Amino acid sequence: MCEIKGKYFDEATFLKNFQGMEDLAYDMVVIFLGSVDSMVAEVENAIKSNNAGQIEISAHSLKGSVSNFYAQECVQIAFKIEQMACGKSYDNNEMNDCLKILKTTTKNLKKDLVSFQDRKKSA
Amino acid sequence: MSTEKNILLVDDSDFDRMMLSRALANKGNYNIKDASSGQQCLKILNVEKIDIILLDIMMPDMDGNELLVKIREKFNPVELPIIMITGKAEATDVVNSLKLGANDFISKPVNFEVALMRISAQIKISDYSKEMIKLQQLSALHALVATYNHELNNPLAIAIANLTQVGFDRNNDEAIKNTENALWRIADIVKKIKEITDGSQIDFVDYNGGQNMLKVK
């Protein structure tokens, strides 16, 4: 199976934005890795509660945070969930499918970020 | 006196707020304050001098546009520039915020260099506009002083003329009364000029149906 490196984390663009602030970039990765699971959990809980308003807010918030890593796959799926919830009525099965994709993409993003973290630590 | 400008960053996302505030503090000569909600933002504005606000549009409870409207009830775009930060970069959302009184907007993910340039530009515009207003007030002050100076001549002329007459006829009560009134008018004008030159605060007030006049405190 061929893995596409950097598909979930655009390291080059991320680092360009933090030029001259590499320590801050590293700190942000560490902080994000510590909080991403709870952000995804918020989306999941909102979906389980069938609370459209809360789904929209939590998905929007997650989208904003992952966008800082130029993680397009995560951004797109979070945006899709946000849009579905914004419409107030949505298909539950479709929403749960989106949640599965969200969990997969954020898991892959985390892998890329941990790899970045490890490389910086050993540098 | 510190020349650092105070930026207030309003975003319900702890992560986004932390990242942007640290990046701005690192790259620019700014003092960063932050708020996680509209209510917190309004509390800060009541007690602190803020030079510019970066305001997230989508927040729970009070969203960015609602907060924008509330802030604009108290501060106009020159007094307090506001840059909206939005993950919703659709044209209608941007136009809506600008119509409600935002000065500019930045899309998420925030490019720090772009953000810094826009913050700097808005602060400069605000500072220059405030200087222009001061210059206009100064110009009005000058006109006022010139007017009072001119006004002094009238009662002064009356006083002198009547004094001359009194000098010939000490029983001329009317002349004495006119002289007295003229001298009091002069004294009052001199007092007002002194207040102005003492640097008292000048305010524009709406007098008698919309006419702008200067109120000397």
Image: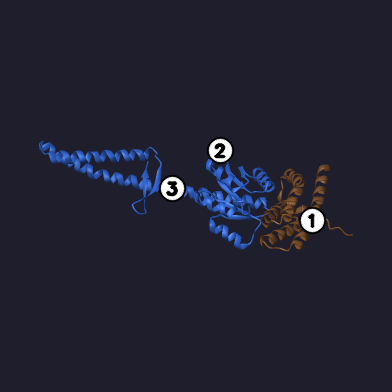
Which kind of residue does numbered mark 2 sit on? Ser
Q: Secondary structure at mark 1?
A: helix
Q: Earlier in the sequence, mark 2 or mark 3?
A: 2
Nearest the viewer among A37 and B198 is A37
Residue drawn at the location 77% of the way across and 62% of the way down: A93
The answer to which image quadrant residue B173 occupies is top left
| Chain bearing mark 1 | A
Residue hosting label 3? B135
Residue A42 x, y percent position in the rendering: 73, 51
Tag of residue B2: 2
Tell me the colour scheme of the image: by chain
Q: Secondary structure at mark 2?
A: loop
- Which residue of the protein is positioned furthest toward the front in this rendering? A49
Question: Which residue is at the far right?
Answer: A1
Which chain has been coloured brown in this picture? A
Relative placement, left or right, of A58 versus B167 is right
Q: What shade does chain B have?
A: blue
State which quadrant residue A72 falls in: bottom right
| Nearer to us: label 2 or label 3 | 2
Residue positioned 25% across, 41% down in the render: B185
**Are the residues flagged by discs 2 and 3 from a single subunit?**
yes
Disc 3: CA contacts within 10 A as few (<14), some (14-19) or many (>=20): few
Distance, label 2 to label 3, CA atoms, is 23 Å
**Residue at image mark 1:** A105
Mark 1 Cα-neighbour bin, 10 Å: few <14, some 14–19, many ≥20 = many
For the question of whether residue B30 can be seen, the reply is no
- 3D distance between C-alphas at marks 2 and 1: 47 Å
Q: Amino acid at mark 3?
A: Leu
Q: State how far apart marks 1 and 3 are (Cα).
A: 58 Å
